[in-house]
C-alpha cells in the first residue's frame, strides 16, 4: 500500500488578506510514496521545486466540507459525468485561486485511490509536472487527512482565529454518533450533502435503508437518483420476491459453491474475478468448453429445468437501476433476474450474477449494476474470463501478435460475447497488440 504525507512550513503571508489565509500561509509539499505531487516548474525562476506557496486554510476546509464524499462517494457514472462531482473529489477545486495540483481522490470499498496529472497553470506562473497513481488504505487515509486538518485548526487557534467554517464543520463531524455517521455515509454515496439534505430525500433514504437488504443497499445508492428513490425501491422489492416459492436441490448448488470457492489473495478485484472463473472451469471439468447460451451454463448445475424455472427477464424494465439481481426463495434456492434485452448481454450479465451467487457466503440477495464498485469489477472480470478464457483466445490466435477489428469480430462470434469483451481480454492479458 502507498503512503501520503502533507509537509508544510509556515511562511510570511506578505499581502494576503483574511485572518484564516494570513494565519495559514505556508510552503506545502504533498508526497505519495515519496513522489512530490506538488512538484512544479516555476516560470519566473525557470526552476523546479517540490512545493507550492499558498494558504492551507482553503485546502483543510475543502477536505472537511467534502469529508463524506471523499470516503464514501464511490465512482458513479450517473454522477461522475457532472462537473460538481469533480469539485468534491479533485484538489484543484480547493485552491480558491491558489495553485494546487490536479489530484483526484476517489474512494472504493477498500481503498482511496489517488490519481494526479500534469497541469499547466499560467495564471499562477507554475506547471505541475508529475503524474501517477497511488492506493491508500481507507483507515490510513482518514488518519492522514485528520492529522492535517487538526494541524491547521491548531494553527488557527494559536493565531487567535475562532469560529471559522473549518472549525465549526470539524466539530460537527466529530460530534456525530454512530447512526448519524451511517446516515452521512448513505447520503454521500447518493451524492447528497448530509448536512444539506431536504426532508423528502431524508425520508426516502431512511425508508430504502429499512426495506432493502443490506447486501444490495450500497449498490442501490450508486444506481438510483434522489428524485426516484421511492419508485426504484418499489421496483426492486417487486423482483426481490419474484422467486419466493422456487424449489430446487439446494444441497447440489451449495456443493458446487463449496468446490469452486477460493480464498482471495489477489491485490485487485479484476484478479479475483479472473482467478474464480479459472477455478470454476477447472473444478467443473470444463476448461476448454465454450458456453454459447445461458442454458449451456445452467446445465452445469445438473438440475432439471433450472434455467427455465430460476431465471426471469423483466417485462417492465428499468435498465439504469440494475443489470441483474440474485434472489433467494424461502427454500434458499437462488433465482436470477436478468434485466437486459440483447442475447449476448443477457449471457454476460447472467455470468456476472453467477459470480455474485458463487461468492456469497449467505443466502442473501445480490445486485449486478453498471457501477464501478469493487464487487462489480470482480463480477465483470469473472464473466469475461468464464465466457472467453484468455487461454482459449491465445490458442485461437496462435502465433499472431497483432490483431485488427476483423480478428476481434471473429473471436467475438466464436465465444458469443461482445467485441468489447474480447478487446478487454486481449489487452488485460497482453495476448496481442490491437491495431485500429
Image (spheres, rainbow, N blue to C red):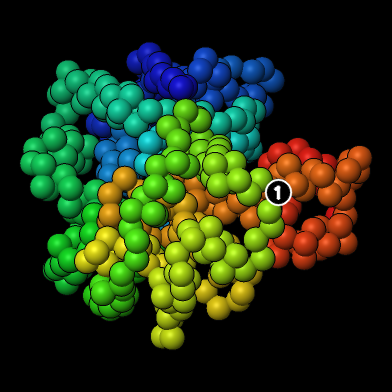
Q: Is residue 328 above or below residue 26?
A: below
Residue pictured at 77% horizontal, 62% vertical:
414
Residue pictured at 34% horizontal, 66% vertical:
248
Front residue of 366/61: it is: 366
Q: Is residue 388 above or below residue 228?
A: above
Residue pictured at 23% horizontal, 59% vertical:
213
Secondary structure category for the residue under label 1: loop
Tell whether 228 sits left or right of 276.
left
Which quadrant would residue 151 be assigned to in this image? Answer: top left
Residue 91 visible in the shown view: no
10 Å neighbourhood of mark 1: few (<14), some, or many (≥20)? few
Residue 222 screen position, x and y as percent: 37, 59
Tell whether 159 sits left or right of 279.
left
Residue pictured at 36% horizontal, 50% vertical:
254
Which residue sits furthest bottom?
A: 315
Tell whether 187 sits left or right of 172.
right
Residue 185 screen position, x and y as percent: 24, 48
Count of residue discs: 1
Tell whether 219 sits left or right of 349.
left
Which quadrant would residue 15 be assigned to in this image? Answer: top left
Front residue of 40/114: it is: 114
Q: Quadrant of the C terminus?
A: bottom right
Residue 111 screen position, x and y as percent: 40, 34
Q: Is residue 433 above or below residue 413?
A: above
Q: Pointer 1: what residue?
A: 288
Front residue of 292/144: it is: 292
Residue 356 screen position, x and y as percent: 42, 53
Residue 406 visible in the shown view: yes
Amino acid at each position: 500500500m502507498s503512503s501520503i504525507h502533507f509537509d508544510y512550513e509556515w511562511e510570511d503571508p506578505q499581502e494576503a488578506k483574511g485572518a484564516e489565509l494570513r494565519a495559514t500561509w505556508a510552503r506545502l509539499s504533498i508526497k505519495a510514496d515519496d513522489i512530490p505531487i506538488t512538484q512544479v516548474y516555476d516560470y519566473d525562476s525557470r526552476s523546479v521545486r517540490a512545493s507550492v506557496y499558498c494558504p492551507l486554510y482553503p485546502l483543510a476546509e475543502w477536505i472537511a466540507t467534502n469529508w463524506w464524499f471523499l470516503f464514501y462517494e464511490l465512482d458513479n457514472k450517473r454522477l461522475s459525468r457532472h462537473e460538481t462531482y469533480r469539485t468534491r473529489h479533485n484538489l484543484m477545486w480547493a485552491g480558491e485561486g491558489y495553485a494546487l495540483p490536479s489530484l483526484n481522490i476517489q474512494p472504493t470499498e477498500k481503498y482511496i485511490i489517488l490519481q494526479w496529472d500534469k497541469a499547466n497553470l499560467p495564471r499562477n506562473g507554475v506547471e505541475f509536472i508529475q503524474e501517477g497513481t497511488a492506493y491508500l488504505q481507507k483507515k490510513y487515509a482518514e488518519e492522514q487527512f485528520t492529522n492535517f486538518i487538526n494541524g491547521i485548526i491548531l494553527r488557527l487557534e494559536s493565531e487567535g482565529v475562532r469560529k471559522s467554517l473549518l472549525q465549526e464543520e470539524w466539530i460537527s463531524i466529530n460530534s456525530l454518533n454512530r447512526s448519524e455517521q451511517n446516515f452521512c455515509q448513505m447520503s454521500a454515496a447518493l451524492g447528497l450533502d448530509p448536512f444539506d439534505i431536504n426532508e423528502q430525500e431524508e425520508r426516502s433514504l431512511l425508508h430504502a435503508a429499512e426495506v432493502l437488504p443490506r447486501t444490495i443497499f450500497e449498490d442501490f445508492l450508486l444506481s438510483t437518483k434522489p428524485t426516484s428513490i421511492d419508485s426504484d425501491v418499489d421496483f426492486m422489492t417487486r423482483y426481490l420476491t419474484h422467486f419466493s416459492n422456487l424449489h430446487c436441490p439446494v444441497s447440489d448448488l451449495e456443493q458446487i459453491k463449496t468446490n469452486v470457492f477460493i480464498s482471495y489473495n489477489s491485490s485487485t478485484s479484476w484478479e479475483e474475478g479472473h482467478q474464480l472463473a479459472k477455478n470454476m472451469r477447472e473444478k467443473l471439468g470444463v476448461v476448454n468448453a465454450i458456453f454459447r447460451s445461458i442454458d449451456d451454463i445452467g446445465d452445469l448445475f445438473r438440475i432439471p429445468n433450472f434455467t427455465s424455472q430460476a431465471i426471469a427477464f423483466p417485462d417492465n424494465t428499468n435498465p439504469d437501476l440494475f443489470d441483474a439481481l440474485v434472489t433467494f426463495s424461502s427454500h434458499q434456492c437462488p433465482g436470477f433476474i436478468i434485466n437486459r434485452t440483447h442475447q449476448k448481454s443477457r449471457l454476460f450479465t447472467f455470468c456476472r450474477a453467477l459470480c455474485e451467487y458463487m461468492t456469497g457466503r449467505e443466502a442473501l440477495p445480490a445486485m449486478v449494476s453498471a457501477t464501478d464498485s469493487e464487487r462489480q469489477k470482480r463480477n465483470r472480470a469473472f464473466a469475461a474470463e468464464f465466457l472467453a478464457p484468455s487461454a482459449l483466445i491465445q490458442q485461437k490466435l496462435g502465433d499472431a501478435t497483432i490483431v485488427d477489428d476483423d480478428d476481434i469480430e471473429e473471436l467475438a462470434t466464436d465465444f458469443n460475447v461482445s467485441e468489447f469483451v474480447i478487446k478487454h481480454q486481449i489487452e488485460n492479458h497482453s495476448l496481442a497488440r490491437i491495431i485500429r
